[in-house]
Image (tube, helix red, strand yellow):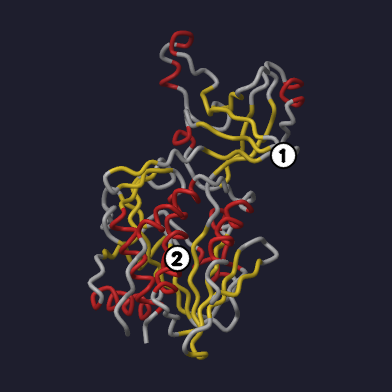
């Protein structure tokens, strides 16, 4: 296996920042998929296509035709949809993805209307003012009935909100609030845009070094992972193994941290493929890639979606450590670079 090419860190962070600032709640991912596709089109060795579900598939000819492989990361994120326009003109929302309600309180949002208008707003308690409601503000349960979107528009009635073009079924995207500081990347939706950036940066690193993968490789940028069926379709039937690149869960009782890439050997769906996981450990050690091994207690991935669709293949999972997952997340450039190098090692594995 040749030496790993240098990771284009500035490119990785620039692409990641722009992708994070492109809203893409599950079901409304076309802008983010298109942005990723536009970037990958600059690399002529990739053959790009879309699935009927709207995912992006890149086929990469390798040095060998036998043993085709695939890697996947997902571009869809947590978000919401308008469930109801309330009599006061504010919005009741329905969750997209598995987050806890109190993690979005106070967040800025954009409502994307079917008339191609964008309306700004904020997620607030129905009783948000301490000067009016006193202790109730702290005591209220946060759920779909007590949180609402206050629109930045002159509306105090259902009719006035309807006249803005807002309707039931419109998508609601949460502000990412991206900030790069002292090597840290702080933002919503690092799950899993950080890993999409790692895959794209690996492609650029290979192209800059005039390298191609050892095996024929498919890259799937999936767009329905947060609701459980992203990679159920889109991976060719002849693929013999899948490397899922998704964020590592950091927190009390976990082995992962924000400065390492992590190999997940088990999550809510059970163990990943032991033999493939062991190979990935060997690749990390051989290439001096800083990594951890961990088990995630409340987690599922596109690898399981593929397995549950009937795939007869090995699946393993790696990714950068991300603190406060499904909340206001944070990782470090060191973890992003380590993950990208691990992807490169896998692409070049003999």
Taking 232 as reference, is 92 above or below it?
above
How many badges with numbers are in the image?
A: 2
Point out residue 167 in the picture as x, y percentages from the top left corner. 73, 33
- Image point 45% across, 16% down: which residue? 136
Please state if 160 lies on the left or on the right of 118 as rendered.
right
Q: Residues within 10 Å of mark 1 (few under 14, many from 20)?
A: few
Q: Nearer the viewer, residue 94 or 167?
A: 167
Q: Quadrant of residue 165?
A: top right
Q: Residues within 10 Å of mark 2 (few under 14, many from 20)?
A: many
Point out residue 108 in the picture as x, y percentages from the top left corner. 51, 31
- Image point 41% across, 43% down: which residue? 187
Q: Nearer the viewer, residue 233 or 289?
A: 289
Indicate the secondary structure of the residue bearing disc 2: helix
Please state if 214 lies on the left or on the right of 120 as rendered.
left
Point out residue 55 in the picture as x, y percentages from the top left corner. 62, 63
Sequence-first tag of 1 and 2? 1
- Image point 37% across, 82% down: which residue? 349
- Image point 59% across, 50% down: which residue? 26
Please state if 162 lies on the left or on the right of 30 as rendered.
right
> Looking at the figure, which quarter contains the C terminus?
bottom left
Mark 2 — residue?
199
Point out residue 341 in the picture as x, y percentages from the top left corner. 33, 69
Mark 1 — residue?
116
Q: Quadrant of residue 155?
A: top right
Indicate the secondary structure of the residue bearing disc 1: loop
Distance, label 1 to label 2, CA atoms, is 31 Å
């Amino acid at each position: 296996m040749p030496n790993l090419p240098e990771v284009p860190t500035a490119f990785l962070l620039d692409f990641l920042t722009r992708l994070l600032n492109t809203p893409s709640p599950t079901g409304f991912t076309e802008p983010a998929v298109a942005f990723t596709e536009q970037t990958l089109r600059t690399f002529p060795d990739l053959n790009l296509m879309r699935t009927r579900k709207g995912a992006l598939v890149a086929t990469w000819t390798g040095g060998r035709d036998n043993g085709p492989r695939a890697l996947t990361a997902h571009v869809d994120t947590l978000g919401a949809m308008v469930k109801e326009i309330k009599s006061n003109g504010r919005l009741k929302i329905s969750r997209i993805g598995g987050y806890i309600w109190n993690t979005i309180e106070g967040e800025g949002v954009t409502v994307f209307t079917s008339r191609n208008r964008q309306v700004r707003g904020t997620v607030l308690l129905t009783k948000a003012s301490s000067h009016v409601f006193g202790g109730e503000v702290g005591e209220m349960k946060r759920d779909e009935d007590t949180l609402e979107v206050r629109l930045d528009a002159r509306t105090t009635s259902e009719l006035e909100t309807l006249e803005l073009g807002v309707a039931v079924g419109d998508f609601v995207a949460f502000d990412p609030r991206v900030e790069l500081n002292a090597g840290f990347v702080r933002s919503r939706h690092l799950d899993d845009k950080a890993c999409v950036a790692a895959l794209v940066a690996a492609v650029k690193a290979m192209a800059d070094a005039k390298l191609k993968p050892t095996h024929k490789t498919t890259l799937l940028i999936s767009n329905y992972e947060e609701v459980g069926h992203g990679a159920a379709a889109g991976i060719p039937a002849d693929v013999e193994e899948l490397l899922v690149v998704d964020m590592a869960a950091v927190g009390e009782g976990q082995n992962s941290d924000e400065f390492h890439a992590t190999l997940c050997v088990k999550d809510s769906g059970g163990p990943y493929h032991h033999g493939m996981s062991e190979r990935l450990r060997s690749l990390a050690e051989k290439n001096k890639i800083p990594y951890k091994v961990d088990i995630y207690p409340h987690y599922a991935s596109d690898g399981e979606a593929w397995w549950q669709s009937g795939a007869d293949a090995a699946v393993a999972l790696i990714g950068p450590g991300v603190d406060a997952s499904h909340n206001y997340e944070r990782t470090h450039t060191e973890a992003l670079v380590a993950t990208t190098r691990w992807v490169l090692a896998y692409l070049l594995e003999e």
